Amino acid sequence: MKYMVLMYADPAATEAMTAEQRADVFRRHEALHRDLESSGELLNGAGLAYPRDTTTLRRSEEGPVTSSDGPFLDATEHLTAYYVIECATPARARAIAERVLDFHVVTTEVRPIHDAFGMGDG
């Protein structure tokens, strides 16, 4: 089964991280990448720009599409990165997601992917 692991962090805390903290986060993700690539579970993933660099488009039944700068929701924690993984069980997906939780990524969501468009066989 394919899963998306969504990672959330506070952008202000991310910007305030020291070089040492950034290096620690990078090392942890590199180790996870190596493990998941060797097991064949990592399909893709990426980090995302800061929420302030987001454009939100909204369609209304009453009028045209509107555009605004900034994220969809006003929140402290924002989506910061994701992995798309393929693993045997929901428990394994949760175990992978737990590995990214730390002082920086404070919340993860694990969602099954029901549509594999652009990712080969479903």
Image: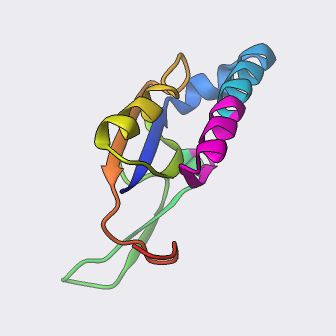
Comparing 6 with 122, the one in front is: 122
> Where's residue 84, x and y in %?
50, 53
- Residue 44 within the segment the image draws in magenta: yes
Q: Which residues make up the magenta segment? A: 30-50
Residue 27 falls left or right of residue 91:
right
- Residue 73 within the segment the image draws in magenta: no
Which residue is drawn at the image coordinates 58% and 22% (left, top)?
Answer: 13
Which residue is drawn at the image coordinates 42% and 48% (left, top)?
Answer: 87
> Where's residue 21, x and y in %?
71, 16
Residue 110, quarter of the rendered image: top left
Determine if residue 92 is in view: yes
Residue 17 falls left or right of residue 62:
right
Q: Is residue 95 above or below residue 57?
A: above
Comparing 13 with 2, the one in front is: 2
Which residue is drawn at the image coordinates 60% and 42% (left, top)?
Answer: 36
Determine if residue 76 is in view: no
Which residue is drawn at the image coordinates 52% and 47% (left, top)?
Answer: 82
Q: Is residue 82 above or below residue 100?
A: below
Q: Quadrant of the N terminus?
A: bottom left
Q: Quadrant of the C terminus?
A: bottom left
> Where's residue 46, x and y in %?
62, 51
> Where's residue 101, x and y in %?
48, 24
Work out which residue is located at the far left of the displayed protein and give it. Answer: 62
